[in-house]
Image (spheres, grey):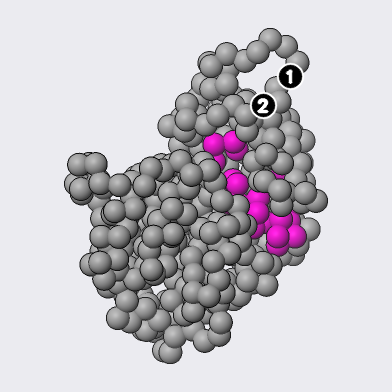
C-alpha cells in the first residue's frame, strides 16, 4: 500500500494544542484506514527505509509497545534506547543524546520524559521528527488522540455535545490536560472532578488559548457524573505530586495556608471512599455511559474491579486503538515537508531540561 498523500504542516507532534480541528479530523480518518489495514493484515510502506527510536525515561507498557508495533506495521526499522543502561546515566545531556541518535541515522524519535519540555528541547536539535509520548505533567498527545478516536467509535451521538467527565488527579495528569484540548476541540463538554488539591486553575493550566472552552470544574462527584456520556478515571500521580508547583492548583477553600500534606491530597483509601468509581456512582451517569482509563489501572482505588472489567468499560478498546492512531500520526509526520515549526511555539512548557 502506498504512503499517505497530501501535505501535513507539522514536523513534530508535541502537544494536541498545536492541532486545528480539521487536522484532528484528518488523524481520525486516517486512523480508521490504519485499523482497516491491520484487520486485513495489509502491509503498508509509509515508513519503509525509515528508522524510529523510542527513548523512554519512565516506565511504559501500552505507549511504548503500541508505538513500536505501529512503526513496524508501517515498515520502519525500530530500536529502543533504554536510559538506565545508556550514557545518560554517565551524565550525557538530552541534547547530546538526540544528536547522537541523529548521527546514527534515526529519522523519528518517540520520547517520554519525566520533565515537562523535554520533547520540545529534543525537537530543536533533531533534524527528523519528534513525537511526545508523555512529558511530566504537561502533555500526552497520542493518548488524547486515541481516546478521542475511541469515543467517536462508541458514542452513538458522536463527540459533539457529549458530556465527558474526567475524574481523579487532574492537576498532575498530562493525559487530562491533553484530553481537555482534544475533546473540547471536537465539541465535547468536559467536567473535571476530584479533590480540591488536585483540581487546576484552568486558565493557568491550559494557557492563553483556554478561554471559551466548555470546561466545568467541581469537587462534587454526583454533580460531575450526572448525565455523563463518558467517564475517564485517572490514577493518583504520587510520583509527580511532590514535583508540581502549587501555583497551578485551583484555589482551595478559605482558611489557613495549605501544608505540604494537604497539598498531597487524600490517601489512596480516602480517595477510593470519596471519589472511586463504584457501580453505585456509575449509576448516576447515563445508562449507556462508557468508562475509560488511560492505564495503568489501580483497581480498588480510582475504580473498582467490577466497573473496570464490567460491560461499560472500554479500557481495552483504548489499548487496541493505540496502534492505528499512532500509525496515523507517524505516517503523517513521515509525509510532512517540515516547513512548519509552529509545534515548537504553541503550548510550550517552561524549559526545565538542561541541554
* Image: 270 above or below 287: above
Residue 170 in view, yes or no: yes
> Which residue: 52% across, 86% down?
5
Q: Are marks 1 and 2 in contact (CB under 8 Å)?
A: yes
> Which residue: 57% across, 42% down?
233
| Rendering quarter of residue 65 | bottom left
**Disc count in the image?**
2
In the drawing, does residue 138 fall left or right of residue 110?
A: right
Alpha carbon separation for disc pair 1 and 2: 8 Å
Crowding around mark 1 (Cα neighbors within 10 Å: few <14, some 14 to 19, many 20+) is few
In the drawing, does residue 233 fall left or right of residue 34?
A: right
The local secondary structure at tag 1 comes to loop
Q: Which mark is residue 25?
A: none
For residue 169: magenta?
no
Give the labeled residue for mark 2: 196
Q: Which mark is residue 253?
A: 1
- Of callouts 1 and 2, the N-terminal one: 2
Q: What range of the chain is rendered magenta?
A: 170-191
* Furthest residue toward bottom: 2
> Which residue: 50% across, 25% down?
268
Crowding around mark 2 (Cα neighbors within 10 Å: few <14, some 14 to 19, many 20+) is many
Amino acid at each position: 500500500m502506498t504512503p499517505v498523500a497530501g501535505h501535513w504542516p507539522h514536523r513534530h507532534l508535541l502537544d494536541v494544542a498545536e492541532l486545528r480541528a480539521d487536522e484532528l479530523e484528518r488523524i481520525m480518518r486516517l486512523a480508521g484506514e490504519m485499523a482497516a489495514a491491520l484487520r486485513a493484515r495489509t502491509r503498508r510502506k509509509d515508513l519503509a527505509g525509515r528508522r524510529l527510536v523510542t527513548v523512554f525515561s519512565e516506565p511504559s507498557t501500552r505507549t511504548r509497545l503500541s508505538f513500536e508495533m505501529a512503526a513496524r506495521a508501517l515498515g520502519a526499522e525500530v530500536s529502543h534506547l533504554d536510559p538506565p543502561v545508556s550514557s545518560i546515566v554517565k551524565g550525557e545531556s538530552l541534547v547530546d543524546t538526540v544528536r547522537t541518535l541523529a548521527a546514527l541515522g534515526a529519522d523519528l524519535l518517540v520520547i517520554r520524559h519525566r520533565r515537562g519540555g523535554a520533547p520540545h528541547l529534543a525537537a530543536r536539535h533533531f533534524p527528523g521528527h519528534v513525537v511526545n509520548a508523555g512529558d511530566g505533567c504537561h502533555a500526552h498527545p497520542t493518548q488524547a488522540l486515541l481516546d478521542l478516536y475511541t469515543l467517536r467509535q462508541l458514542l452513538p451521538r458522536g463527540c459533539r455535545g457529549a458530556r465527558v467527565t474526567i475524574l481523579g488527579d487532574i492537576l498532575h495528569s498530562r493525559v487530562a490536560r491533553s484530553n481537555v484540548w482534544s475533546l473540547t476541540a471536537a465539541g465535547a463538554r468536559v467536567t473535571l472532578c476530584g479533590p480540591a488539591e488536585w483540581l487546576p486553575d484552568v486558565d493557568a493550566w491550559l494557557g492563553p488559548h483556554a478561554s471559551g472552552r466548555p470546561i466545568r470544574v467541581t469537587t462534587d462527584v454526583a454533580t460531575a457524573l450526572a448525565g455523563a456520556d463518558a467517564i475517564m478515571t485517572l490514577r493518583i500521580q504520587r510520583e509527580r505530586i511532590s514535583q508540581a508547583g502549587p501555583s497551578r492548583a485551583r484555589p482551595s477553600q478559605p482558611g489557613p495556608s495549605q501544608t505540604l500534606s494537604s497539598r498531597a491530597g487524600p490517601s489512596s483509601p480516602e480517595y477510593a471512599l470519596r471519589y472511586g468509581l463504584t457501580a453505585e456512582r456509575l449509576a448516576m451517569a447515563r445508562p449507556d455511559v462508557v468508562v475509560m482509563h488511560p492505564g495503568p489501572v489501580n483497581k480498588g482505588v480510582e475504580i473498582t474491579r467490577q466497573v473496570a472489567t464490567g460491560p461499560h468499560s472500554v479500557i481495552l478498546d483504548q489499548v487496541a486503538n493505540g496502534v492505528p492512531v499512532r500509525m496515523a500520526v507517524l505516517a503523517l509526520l513521515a509525509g510532512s515537508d517540515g516547513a512548519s515549526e509552529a509545534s515548537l511555539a504553541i503550548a510550550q512548557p517552561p524549559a526545565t531540561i538542561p541541554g
